[in-house]
Amino acid sequence: MELPRGRAWELSDRQLGILFLLPFAVVSCLFVIYPALEAVRLAFYEKLPFQRTLTFVGLDNFRYVFADPVFWAALRQTVVWTLASIVLQTVFGVGIALLLNQTLRGINVFRGLLLFPYMVPTVVIALIWRWMFNPEFGVVNAVLRGSGLISAPIYWLATPLWAMVSTILLNVWKFTPFVVICVLARLQVIPLELYEAAAVDGAGAWRAFLHITLPQLKTVLALVVVFRTIWTFNKFEEIYLLTRGGPGTATFNLAVYAFEQATANLKLGAAAATGVVMLTVLFGGSVLYLWLIQQEEA
Amino acid sequence: MRRRERLTRRRFLRWAASGAGAAAFRLPAATLAAEKTGTVRVWGEPGPYGAVAVDGMNEWAQQHAPGLRFAIETLPWSDVYPKLMTDLAAGRPPHCISVESPIAFQLMAEGLLEPVDDLVQKIGRTRLIPAARWEYWGAWKGRQYILPAHHQAHLLVVRTDILREAGVTKPPGDWDWNDQLAAAQRIKAKTKLYGLCFALGRNLATDYYVISLLHSAGGRMFDADAKFQVVFDSPAAVETFEYIRELFPTMPPGAVGYSFLDVVDSMVTGQTAMVFYWGRVFGRAAEINPDLFKGMEAYQHARHPRTGKRYNWNDFQGWAIPKDNNPYVAEVRQALTHVLSSKEWAIRYVHSLVPNVSPVFQDVVQDPRLLQHPFFATKRRTIFEYYTEALKHASNSGNELLRGINPLAGIVHGRSILAQGIEKVILDKQPAGDAVKWVQQQLEAIRREHLRLLG
């Protein structure tokens, strides 16, 4: 049936699409693009929180952060924290997704439960983990001591190495479900014929995983890794709530460093400059990673 | 183009008449202030005393501004600085703040606070306890900006039963630094407890512990007599850092992440025999571990063997009124005057956490009702160690050795400079001399960046 045409109020599909996109565009401009641009601008100014004056200082804020050994330590720790988190999340995520892809009775209950860490607010998780990691009465040490694995308590959050391990564990626990959901969704649409054909050709489970499952997951894993890298690199609240960047500055990442510059050092410009550095690193890294994937596929 | 109007007699009279008219209309508006409505946000540190003061403010509000309600918002100490800075920067400050003096001094010098000289007169300039002066709470360039809430010192708190068990016989009041170290080591060796504990995390608490030891050793951060030049790099600072390094093996290993309340927990859960702490630790022990409370006593700090000094950290906690973006300045001024002029409210305030909040007015100290708290039956000596004796050894970073108010100290604590310095020694195993030089550089940078605050 042909719809009546020619009415003034009637919109074309393109116009309708634009109309639906408009609220998102407005909100994005107000709350994403404008603050980001403002942060980039602030990186070139000196601004004291209590005063309305802005003083242009050129690249001084960048010189300041690049000359600060804590910035470089924070950058190193950010890389360690991001890489370790992403590798573990991907490995566990794929593994758990493969398990949850089985057709068993009640599997949906497990699939639902898996979302639990992802749903709980970070502040609640961090507080619970602080208790769990308490050296004297935390459950982690109690289990380790009870099973005879350690004789003296581990000071999880007071030792630089263990503090970093603790923050990574928390991040992996909380965000592995995201990887699971993405991978599981892809797993469920891989044609079963591929596995049947491989089985006919004598391929075992490992070879089927290596030559069918993994290539099929490649695209989704590429996206997951890019998103998780961006989000983990930027992460603030898990580290701040669990260790506050300590002991010392052993678990500072760039986000915590920027926060400290703004609120403790009152250097809003230096904090913004740190943000610009993070933006540049992430943007460059993401473009390079996706380009490499494309090259490989080509 | 508009012609410039000449001032004539007629025009002058017209302006005068309009001015008088405006004033006449403003008069009822001013009287309407008492009819204001809303919530007056009062920031305080954790503890019941802020809420007691707010009860007093609400008593005033019921009589004079029934539409107003004062509400306490308590902030953990470690969050005070970032929260304060971000709220002030965002133009949404609390309407009244109870804060420790070094941070208050920074706000005062930044020009963010309402002067309160007239309120000092109303509350009673001569009421302060001996050895205390109004400027300890916050005066700058001849004007008073902070009103006293209480003073609170950290002292050496010991479990006398554990000292006996470890065979430490010399009374803690007679100790010097060497005796203190020996006692801590002996407790660690002879009992199941850690010898001593204080905070060594990257936070405000650690700064406070380090500074009191530094002052006892004869060191300072800034020289108040020489335009606050940085004088931290000194043998006294190196000695302080090395002394803490020697003490550390007697502490819980987790102390490197501890802040204020971790130290309290360390003692009241029976983990540690001695702590440097404010009177709060007694209230907490009485609440959760009454047996342990019985054996606890507080003493002035061990004296430094060479200088003979035994400085504590005294907060000199006061009330400040942010002047910008604050629609309730007039009401807060009146409510504070009401509370601080009242002996009844002062006693309720002090009784809310004995002996953590020490009274600041002599008439309150002498009021027999002050002694009507159960702790006085068994801990009277300890309580007066906090209330009066501690003032003889009072110091803090914002008024080092009580020789001059320094608005840079708040920034030092905001950045946890001293804590970072000692962490370099404890965690990174750096030589004390190197860590001291690092702190010196940081302090010099702070002074350079904030010279404007020094006038």
Image (cartoon, coloured by chain):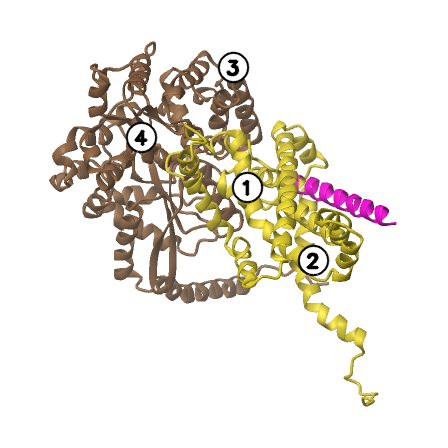
Q: Disc 4 marks which amino acid?
A: Gln
Q: Give the label, 4 or 3, closer to the camera.
A: 4
Q: Chain of mark 4?
A: B
Mark 4: give few (<14), some (14-19) or many (20+) Cα within 10 Å.
Answer: some
Q: Which residue is mark 4?
A: B271
**Front-lying residue, A226 or A143:** A143
Q: Residue at (16%, 28%) from the top-left corner?
A: B381
Which residue carries the number 3 mark? B431
Amino acid identity at mark 2? Leu
Q: Which residues are magenta?
A: A274-298
Name chain A's colour: yellow
Residue B397 shown in magenta: no
Q: Are the residues flagged by discs 2 and 4 in contact, CB closer than 8 Å?
A: no
Quadrant assignment, res A103: bottom right
Inspect the magenta stretch and tell me whether residue A286 lies in it: yes
Which comes before the other along the chain, label 4 or label 3?
4
Q: Badges 4 and 3: C-beta atoms under 8 Å apart?
A: no
The residues bearing labels 1 and 2 have C-alpha atoms spaced at a distance of 26 Å
Task: Indicate which label's residue lies in the foreground, 4 or 1.
Answer: 1
Please, what is the dominant secondary structure of the magenta stretch? Answer: helix
Q: Which residue is mark 2?
A: A187
Residue that label 1 marks: A169
Chain coloured brown here: B
Amino acid beneath label 1: Leu
Chain of the residue on which disc 2 is drawn: A
Neighbor class of circle 1 (other Cα within 10 Å; few <14, some 14-19, many 20+) is: some
Q: Residue at x 53, y 47 (%)?
A: B89
